[in-house]
Image (cartoon, rainbow, N blue to C red):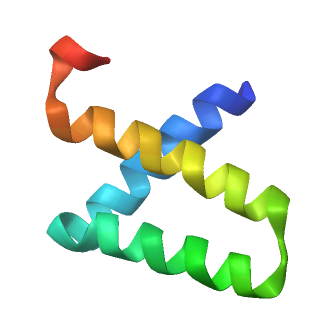
Amino acid sequence: MTPDEERWAEALAVERIHGADAPRYVAERIGALALAGDQAGIDRWKEIASRLDQLSRGPRHL
């Protein structure tokens, strides 16, 4: 699985588990990682957030 495919799988899992609260969950994760100084984690969750946003917009925006 490529890193891009992993981010899509992660976004789908977050959406499935957290539903409408998924964006808030992702924002909380990014905030916690920022407080911890984990730039790689922040970057990863921003990529997940981007894919989650694309999923919420529908197939035309993928």
Q: For the point 30% across and 32% down, which residue is it?
A: 54
In the image, taking residue 55 as reference, residue 39 lies left or right, namely: right
In the image, taking residue 36 as reference, residue 20 lies left or right, namely: left
In the image, taking residue 41 as reference, residue 56 lies left or right, namely: left
Which image quadrant for residue 26? bottom left
Q: Residue furthest top?
A: 60
Image coordinates for residue 41, horizontal then vertical, percent: 75, 63
Circle count: 0
Question: Residue 47, relative to residue 38: is it above or below?
Answer: above
Q: For the point 18% across and 18% down, which residue is it?
A: 59
Question: Residue 33, relative to residue 23: is it above or below?
Answer: below
Which image quadrant for residue 7? top right
Image coordinates for residue 24, horizontal then vertical, percent: 32, 74
Which image quadrant for residue 21? bottom left
Question: Residue 26, relative to residue 47: is it above or below?
Answer: below
Image coordinates for residue 62, horizontal then vertical, percent: 32, 18
Q: For the point 26% across and 36% down, which residue is it?
A: 55
In the image, taking residue 47 as reference, residue 18 lies left or right, namely: left
In the image shown, does 4 or 34 lie closer to the viewer?
Answer: 34
User: Which part of the image, by quadrant, shows the N terminus?
Assistant: top right
Question: Residue 2, relative to residue 43: is it above or below?
Answer: above
Image coordinates for residue 60, horizontal then vertical, percent: 17, 12
